[in-house]
Image (tube, helix red, strand yellow):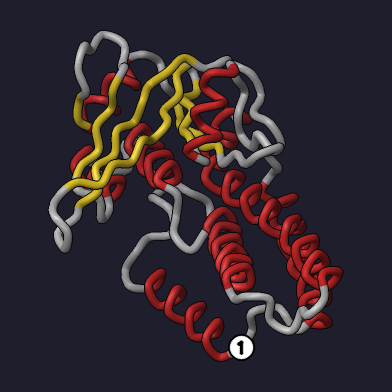
């Protein structure tokens, strides 16, 4: 979770485009990011993959009033509403975008192409029918913010006691590098999102980064099987809370529109 999900970029900038707060060109540039190209396959009325500009316009014409994301994991269908085929594809990709009002969803398939040393990434968004129903397990922004603070406090206590929090110099340097990248002109969210959503997403990304660093930092001072298991138990709910908070932040503008 050191980087933002592609589904997050697509939903955030797609929502800004739907609200007419950015141009189609600016939205596509932001969505593609460092990838080479994004296409959408299976769009109703199209027999071949199309570019993002056409796809976003077509989705609006089909009734899409907003885009929300799902970040599912095994045993946790976060943000999904079915049907089973779409959920299975989203779970495999670990992310998806759902179009409010159009009963369609998009799942990314990521491909690497090019010779060694010059590899570029191409993304095909597979468009599939979705069930129009409340998404699974998505908190409000307020709930997500409280959960993040509580989970981070509880996990820090456990991990510090086990000396496996990943808080050594290497981990701290990695977190600072992550923060510096995030501050080099990258918008955390697209125009139109409330300040609270930006705050929640920033905290969720930082918590996710710490979880990743702690997970990848070996076993630290945990020298017994019970201590290693305790670290896993401490990290698991924190990672879950961070994913829930990311979904709440990216989906916040769609939720607000629905409440008006």
As drawn, is 176 to the left or to the right of 27? right
Front position in the image: 185 or 118: 118
Query: Is residue 7 placed above or below 218 in the rendered structure?
Result: above
Residue 137 in picture, x, y percent from top left: 71, 36
Q: Is residue 92 visible?
A: yes
Q: Nearer the viewer, residue 251 or 177?
A: 177
* Mark 1 element type: loop
In the shown orientation, is residue 119 left or right of residue 165?
A: left
Report the quarter where the C terminus lies: top right
Residue 147: which quarter of the image? bottom right
217 displayed left or right of 101 = right
The residue at the point 41 percent across, 69 percent down is: 182
In the current view of this chain or complex, which residue is farthest to the bottom?
Answer: 169
Considering only vertical position in the picture, is 53 above or below 220?
A: above
Front-most of 204 and 145? 204
Residue sitting at the far right: 226
Q: Where is 39 relative to 142, above or below? A: above
* Residue at horizontal 43 percent and vertical 41 percent from the top: 7
- Mark 1, other Cα within 10 Å: few <14 / some 14–19 / many ≥20: few
**Picture quadrant of residue 165:** bottom right
Q: Residue at x 75, y 62 (%)?
A: 232
Judge whether residue 102 can be spotted in this image: no
Residue 144, image x, y percentages: 70, 52
Q: Is residue 26 left or right of residue 11?
A: left
Give the image location of residue 130, x and y in percent: 52, 17
> What residue occupies the far top of the structure in this picture?
45
Instruction: Quickly name the residue at label 1.
Output: 168
Q: Residue 242 placed where, x, y %? A: 64, 56
* For residue 152, above or below residue 105: below
Q: Which residue does the image show at 33% across and 73% down from the upper left?
A: 184
């Amino acid at each position: 979770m050191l980087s933002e999900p592609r589904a997050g970029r697509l939903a955030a900038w797609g929502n800004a485009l739907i609200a007419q707060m950015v141009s189609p060109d600016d939205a596509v540039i932001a969505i593609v990011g460092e990838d080479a190209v994004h296409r959408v396959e299976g769009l109703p009325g199209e027999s071949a993959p199309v570019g993002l500009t056409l796809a976003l316009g077509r989705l609006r014409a089909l009734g899409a009033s907003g885009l929300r994301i799902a970040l599912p994991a095994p045993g946790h269908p976060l943000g999904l509403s079915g049907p089973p085929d779409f959920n299975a594809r989203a779970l495999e990709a670990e992310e998806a975008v759902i179009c409010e009002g159009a009963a369609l969803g998009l799942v990314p398939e990521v491909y690497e192409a090019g010779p060694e040393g010059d590899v570029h990434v191409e993304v095909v968004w597979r468009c599939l029918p979705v069930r129009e129903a409340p998404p699974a397990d998505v908190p409000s922004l307020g709930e997500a913010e409280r959960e993040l603070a509580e989970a981070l406090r509880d996990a820090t206590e456990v991990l510090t006691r086990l000396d496996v929090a990943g808080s050594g110099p290497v981990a701290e340097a990695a977190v600072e590098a992550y923060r510096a990248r995030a501050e080099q002109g990258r918008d955390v969210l697209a125009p139109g999102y409330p300040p609270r959503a930006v705050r929640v997403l920033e905290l969720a990304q930082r918590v996710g980064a710490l979880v990743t660093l702690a997970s990848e930092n070996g076993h630290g001072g945990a020298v017994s099987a019970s201590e290693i298991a305790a670290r896993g138990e401490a990290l698991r709910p924190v990672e879950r809370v961070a994913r829930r908070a990311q979904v709440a932040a990216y989906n916040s503008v769609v939720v607000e529109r629905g409440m008006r």
